[in-house]
């Protein structure tokens, strides 16, 4: 199938690349979607809640914190990188020995 490019020339559609932006590509790559179970972004250890003008904005530390609304995440969604705080506390070793030199 052919389409007209910016210069009025016909070109194959296989050369047309869809560009979504960094944050949208990250969400697509990590299967970011509405949660089907009790796993939610707001319970994830990477979730950061920012307050601005009495409103809450959720950001993901793995995706990167910016002041753009493109980097906002929904509290009831989840991605493949989800890590629950209670699950991580179970994994931590109870006795950590500190060795100091000198």
Image: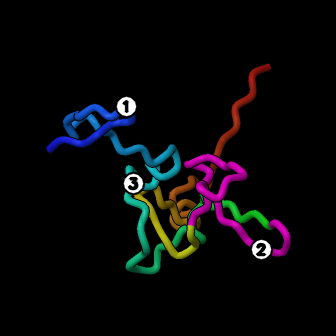
* 87 on left or right of 33: right
Q: Are marks 2 and 3 in contact (CB under 8 Å)?
A: no
Q: How crowded is mark 2: few (under 14 residues within 10 Å), some or many (20 or more)?
A: few
Q: What stretch is highlighted in magenta?
A: 52-73
- Which of 41/34 is in front? 34
* Residue 66 sits above or below residue 100 on the image: below
**For residue 55, which numbered disc appears in the image?**
2
> In the displayed image of the protein, which residue is found farthest to the right?
53
Q: Does the magenta stretch include residue 64?
A: yes
SS for tag 1? loop
Q: In which quarter of the image is residue 37?
A: bottom left
SS for tag 3? helix
Q: Name the residue under label 3.
A: 28
- At a point 83% along the width and 75% down the height, the residue shown is 54
Q: Name the spot of residue 26 as percent of width and height, x first.
A: 46, 49
- At a point 23% along the width and 34% down the height, the residue shown is 10
**For residue 7, which numbered disc appears in the image?**
1
SS for tag 2? strand
């Amino acid at each position: 199938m052919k389409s007209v490019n910016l210069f009025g020339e016909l070109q194959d559609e296989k050369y047309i690349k869809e560009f979504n932006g960094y944050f949208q590509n990250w969400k697509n790559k990590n299967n970011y979607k509405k949660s089907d179970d009790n796993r939610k972004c707001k319970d994830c250890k990477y979730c950061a809640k920012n307050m601005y003008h009495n409103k809450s904005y959720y950001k993901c530390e793995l995706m990167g914190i910016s002041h753009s609304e493109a980097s906002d995440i929904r509290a009831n969604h989840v991605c493949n990188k989800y890590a629950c705080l209670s699950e991580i506390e179970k994994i931590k070793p109870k006795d950590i020995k500190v060795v100091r030199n000198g």
